[in-house]
Image (cartoon, helix red, strand yellow):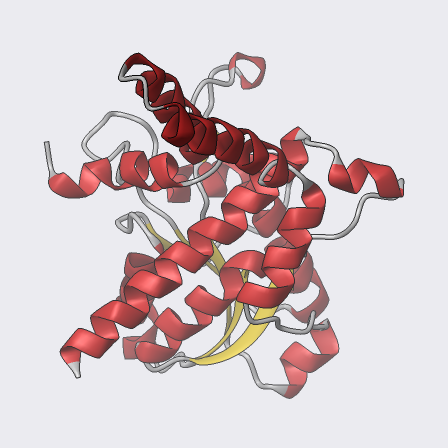
Amino acid sequence: MELTSLKPFFTNLLLPSSSALLLIFIGILSLRIKNKRYSRICLYGGLAAAWILSCNLSAQWLNTNLLKHYAFTTPKQIKKNKVQAIVVLGSGIQSYAPEYLNASQPSSTSAARLRYGAWLYIQTRIPIAFSGGHGWATRGGDMDSEAKTARFYLKSFKLPPPKWLDDRSADTAENAQEMARILLPLGITRIALVTHAWHMERSVRLFGQQGFVITPAPIQTITPEAYGLLNIIPSAEGVTNVAYVLKEVLALTVMNIKEMTIF
């Protein structure tokens, strides 16, 4: 097993709700060694963390204060910036989809990005490039690549399929490298980059390092619930959004450390 295949495991272990549950578990274990003070700190801290890191309000605060924000773009702005390709970043697949005659489908996040990329194409007639192979957790398996799934998804709904496909990359850094390998030799340097708002900062940095001139085209920023009290109550959406933001913060921190060690 490649060490990089364990990357999703360690990442998820550090994120809610795994980290909060781990703290609670440590507190329970410490009861057996009769260290009640340490146990109470772990138990109460874990419970508090489990609640706080499961609320959509926490996701909004973290997103606002820890990540850089990019304005939503328009087809008019994309044309003005002389964009040559609309680059859509993959985000996993749903490999088991019997309702589609067992044809793999994009994950909900990938599908949202593909829809927006296709809409931008319809508005601008600028061709689409899609980047996504197999994630680290599935690399070496027999599942379809994200790129193959993306092509099937768009064609099945009579939407324009990508003109360029990268089916090798496993993460955002490789997305940028593979798109550079495909597009730069064709003289394509000006791109509209389609990904989720919380993923945009890291994506812009990585694609910029490859020499692209980027028009950010973010989708789906984290917004408050319509009913205010729902923002402070733990929810599946809250857990998911907090995890998205903290994963990006963790990845950006690792990037910064790598850059510091290089220079």
Front position in the image: 118 or 228: 228
Rendering coords of residue 140 (x, y %): 18, 32
Q: Could you say which quadrant of the image residue 61 lies in?
A: bottom right
Rendering coords of residue 183 (x, y %): 34, 71
Residue situated furthest left in the rendering = 1
Say if 42 sits above or below 82 in the image. Answer: above
Whether residue 81 sits left or right of residue 141 in the image: it is right
Q: Residue at x 31, y 27 (%)?
A: 143
Rendering coords of residue 150 (x, y %): 48, 42
- Would you say residue 220 is visible in this rendering? no
- Would you say residue 14 is visible in this rendering? yes
Whether residue 29 sits left or right of residue 139 in the image: it is right
Front position in the image: 247 or 40: 40
Q: Residue at x 49, y 32 (%)?
A: 46
Front position in the image: 177 or 33: 33
Rendering coords of residue 119 (x, y %): 68, 57
Say if 204 sits above or below 115 in the image. Answer: below
Whether residue 24 sits left or right of residue 108 in the image: it is left
Q: Residue at x 47, y 16 (%)?
A: 102
Quadrant location of the N terminus? top left
Q: Residue at x 17, y 84 (%)?
A: 263
